[in-house]
Amino acid sequence: MKKIFITGWLFLAVNLIYGQDENRIIFGSLECSPAGDKIIFSAISVKSDWSNFKPENWVVLQYNLADKSLIEISTGGLYASYSPDGNSIIFEKRTGESQNIFVRDLDSGNEFQLTDNEHRNFGGSWSPDGQQIVYNSNQTGTIEIFICNKDGTNHRQLTFSGEHKSYNPKWSPFGNDIVYYFEKGDGKDQIYVMNSNGEKVRNITNNDSHSYYPSWRDEKSVVFAADPDEIHTISLDGSKNQPILGIKSFYAVFSRDGSKLFFINTADKDRITINIMEMKSSKTSILLAGEDLEELVKN
């Protein structure tokens, strides 16, 4: 694994201002470790017109808040998720013409393949006891949510979306519910919750807004992105849909204890950063913002 230490601002951008022939760094996902001491995210370096894009160039990186170090976890992955004990991650990468999900032990670096088919499998999330994994797959012809055991056995389908799509499943670390967003193609994606056997499905946003990338705030509420670049929280019963003031972002996750919010900050379109908000004080600071990522994220 490659490891570097951050000595200045690490510039982390979704849309940098580059010339057409220059590469820019694009970011795919963000998650906080169970202990709240690390974040894991994916990044890729591409030209502004994406003419040199290759899925295998995605890089999964981990940032340590204590020593401010960056570690390259793996290449070819986009979404990544910590196990409940923080010792392993799941992520996906290209396997020939398909895309499959892998589990990686963070200490040993050992990996094993969780899914093994000729389709697109991605976006996994662990059950609270670490025994099961929920993920996305297009093996039925559209994007649906599936579940399997941690050893890759007993795969079964949870959602049946018809011509629509169900994205970004996140298993509650506090219980049996799974949150995701439902896409109908009308630009008004909605946040849904179901239990782990695919029952008790309900739309908790239930409005005309565009809502996506949900994650868990606590056992009774979730956090999600809503246009235009707003971060909201909402109770599981659909009440208290409220924006978090002072934030412009399209992706945000809470620490397990709810004391910190990590988010990709888009307030300055010329300088996108990963920020942290201390919820008690509402104090916000930049975690990562600097061109040093170019040492690890290359085309």
Image (cartoon, grey):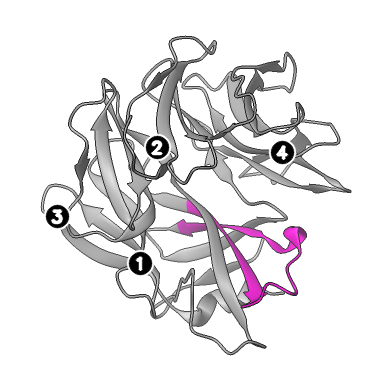
| Extent of the magenta region | 40-63
Residue on which the image places disc 4: 102
- Please, which residue is most extreme toward the left here? 281
Of callouts 3 and 4, which one flags the residue occurring earlier in the amino acid sequence? 4
Q: Is tag 1's residue or tag 3's residue first in the polypeptide sequence?
A: 1
Q: For residue 57, what is the image quadrant?
A: bottom right
Q: Nearer the viewer, mark 1 or mark 4?
A: 1
Ranked by sequence position, the earlier of labels 4 and 2 is: 4
> Regarding mark 3 in the picture, which secondary structure is present there?
loop
Q: Residues within 10 Å of mark 2 (few under 14, many from 20)?
A: many
> What label does residue 215 carry, if any?
2
C-alpha separation, residue under disc 1 versus residue under disc 2? 19 Å
Does the image show residue 297?
no
Residue 33 point in image, percent of width and height:
43, 43
Tag in front: 2 or 3: 2
Q: Is residue 241 above or below residue 36?
A: above
For the C terminus, the quadrant is bottom right
Q: Is residue 122 visible?
A: yes
Left or right, residue 281 beside residue 296: left
> Which residue is drawn at the image coordinates 55% and 37% (left, top)?
87
Question: Which one is nearer the viewer's eye here, 57 or 98?
Answer: 98
Give the x, y percent position of residue 76. 72, 55
